[in-house]
Image (tube, rainbow, N blue to C red):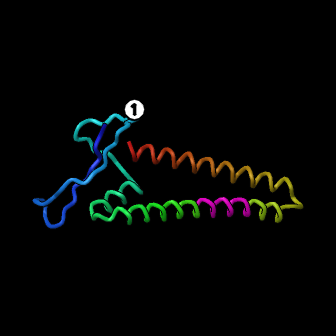
Amino acid sequence: MAIVFRYFVTCCAADAQPIGLVIKKDNGLKIKNNDWVRITGVVMVMLFAISLNMTWLGILIGIFISIGMAVTVSGLVVLGVSGKSDVRSVTSCHKKIFFIIEAIIEIMAGLMIMGLGVYFSITTA
């Protein structure tokens, strides 16, 4: 079991109070006492909302964050699919050019995903 918390300050350091969450299952999480743990997104929003005694607001913002992520990912997929069909229609008379462009785009996309993975693993370590 672990407790993840942050200090909530209303005026100065003297009135700082810990606000946190209890993690019951650690799933192999190796946290030592007084370690810093990076938390992002909805967890941070929930901690802030709980510190303001507005849990409902944290839940509402979490829902909107999820909807925003779903719309963004769906939009990117639609752009990717429509972009591929647009390239195919432009290069319909030159099939060899289409396959070359398709291979280049797929390689670039793979390299960008790999680069993001390396970046995130370096920055979160």
Magenta span main SS: helix
Asked which quadrant contains residue 43, the reply is: bottom left
Q: How far across and down, in percent of the image, does residue 31 sit?
A: 30, 37
Magenta span includes 18 = no
- Measured as percent of width and height from the top left, residue 57 is found at 38, 66
Q: Is residue 26 above or below residue 71?
A: above
Whether residue 112 sits left or right of residue 10 in the image: it is right
Name the residue rendered at 44%, 65% in the picture: 60
The correct choice, above or below, for 41 with respect to 3 in the image is below
Highlighted range, magenta: 73-83
Q: In the rendered view, does 89 fall on the left or right side of 49? A: right
Q: 94 and 109: which one is in front?
A: 109
Q: Residue at x 34, y 42 (%)?
A: 23
Instruction: Tell me: 16 left or right of 70.
Output: left
Report the residue at 28% width, 51% height from top: 20
Q: Quadrant of residue 14?
A: bottom left
Q: Position of residue 48 (x, y in %)?
A: 31, 61
Q: Nearer the viewer, residue 50 or 65?
A: 50
Q: Is residue 22 above or below residue 51?
A: above
Q: Secondary structure at mark 1?
A: loop
Quarter assignment of residue 98: bottom right
Residues 38 and 7: in front is 7
Residue wearing tag 1 = 28
Q: Position of residue 96 (x, y in %)?
A: 84, 53
Residue appearing at x 83%, y 64% in the figure: 89
The amino acid type of the residue labelled 1 equals: Gly
Q: Can you name the residue that lies furthest to the top here? A: 28
